[in-house]
């Protein structure tokens, strides 16, 4: 069986909490996960000024290929991370975001990480995504084991833990006796390069969310 990617592991945890791949507050984190995943695979570089530079090496995962193509079509040598998030997650058209999510969903279906069910609605049937509970449990056990054990953490687990922590999922998988050790580990990984990238991305996401909220409020005001 193919090894689960960081993004797929994050999605299993996301679906356990939210039951959908289209949660507006979380889809930017999917894009960030893919970008950093591609950085680790040397498909792109993130500069000190938080700009993305594509490399000549193409990604192997289909959803990353789709994102890579979208970034490439922006036709700039260096693209601010904030601009990528804005273009994909906060633009008036959701076409690119839907294409990426659908490609990711197809990946996970093929890898038997999720299944799709049809739920009857008032007008049309609704697609329901179900996770493989055993594989979700494996992810949870991996995260707990890595973070509670002494020793160096891998880049993969730092990325996954940082994503889960940023979206408030991480503490849900630890009991109250384990949370003190978790806090120590989070302090330990806080200053790693990957954790810093997540923090920068989180700031960009928060800023964009605030801008979009303000725009929606202004649009709703009577003239």
Image: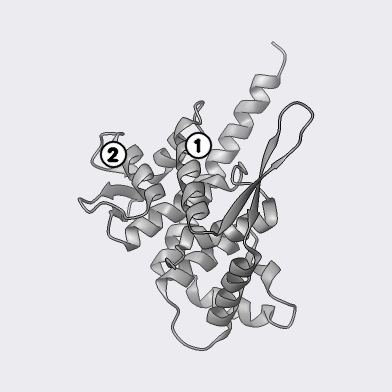
Left or right: 208 with respect to 116?
A: left
Residue 207 placement (x, y as % from top left): 54, 42
Question: Against 92, is 211 above or below?
Answer: below
Q: Position of residue 73 (x, y in %)?
A: 30, 34
Q: What residue would you read off at disc 2?
A: 72
Query: Residue drawn at (51%, 65%), measured in percent from left and top?
Result: 160
Q: Residues within 10 Å of mark 1 (few under 14, many from 20)?
A: some
**How many residues crowd mark 2 within 10 Å: few (<14), some (14–19), many (20+)?**
some
The quadrant of the picture occupied by the N terminus is bottom left
User: How many numbered circles does the render carry?
Assistant: 2
Residue corresponding to mark 1: 98
Q: To which quarter of the image does residue 194 belong?
A: bottom left
Label whose residue precedes the other's in the sequence (2 or 1): 2
On the image, the x and y values in percent for residue 180 come to: 67, 81
- Looking at the image, which residue is at 60% across and 27% down? 215
Question: Which secondary structure, mark 2?
Answer: helix
The residue at the far left in this view is 56
Assign the C terminus to one quadrant of the image.
top right
Name, please, the residue furthest toward the right: 122
In this rendered view, identify the residue nearer to me: 60 or 111.
111
| Point 26% across, 51% down: residue | 58
Q: Secondary structure at mark 1?
A: helix
Nearer the camera: disc 2 or disc 1: 1
Q: Residue at x 47, y 70 (%)?
A: 158
Residue 173 percent across, percent down from the top left: 68, 71
In front of the other: 216 or 114:
114
Give the answer, above or below, for where 95 lies relative to 67. above
Q: Where 153 sits versus 4, above or below? A: below
Q: Is residue 141 visible?
A: yes
């Amino acid at each position: 069986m193919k090894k689960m990617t960081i993004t797929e592991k994050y999605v299993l945890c996301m679906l356990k909490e939210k039951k959908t791949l289209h949660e507006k507050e979380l889809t930017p984190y999917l894009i960030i996960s893919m970008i950093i995943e591609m950085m680790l695979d040397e498909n792109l570089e993130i500069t000190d000024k938080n700009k993305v530079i594509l490399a000549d090496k193409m990604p192997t995962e289909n959803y990353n290929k789709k994102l890579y193509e979208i970034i490439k079509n922006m036709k700039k040598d260096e693209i601010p991370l904030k601009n990528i998030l804005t273009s994909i997650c906060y633009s008036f058209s959701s076409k690119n975001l839907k294409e990426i999510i659908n490609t990711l969903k197809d990946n996970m279906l093929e890898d038997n990480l999720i299944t799709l069910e049809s739920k009857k609605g008032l007008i049309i049937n609704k697609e329901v995504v179900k996770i493989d509970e055993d594989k979700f449990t494996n992810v949870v056990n991996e995260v707990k084991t890595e973070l509670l054990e002494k020793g160096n953490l891998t880049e993969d687990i730092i990325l996954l833990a940082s994503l889960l922590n940023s979206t408030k999922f991480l503490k849900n998988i630890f009991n109250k006796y384990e949370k003190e050790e978790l806090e120590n580990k989070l302090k330990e990984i806080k200053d790693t390069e990957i954790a810093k990238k997540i923090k920068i991305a989180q700031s960009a996401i928060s800023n964009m969310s605030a801008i979009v909220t303000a725009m929606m409020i202004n649009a709703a005001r009577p003239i």
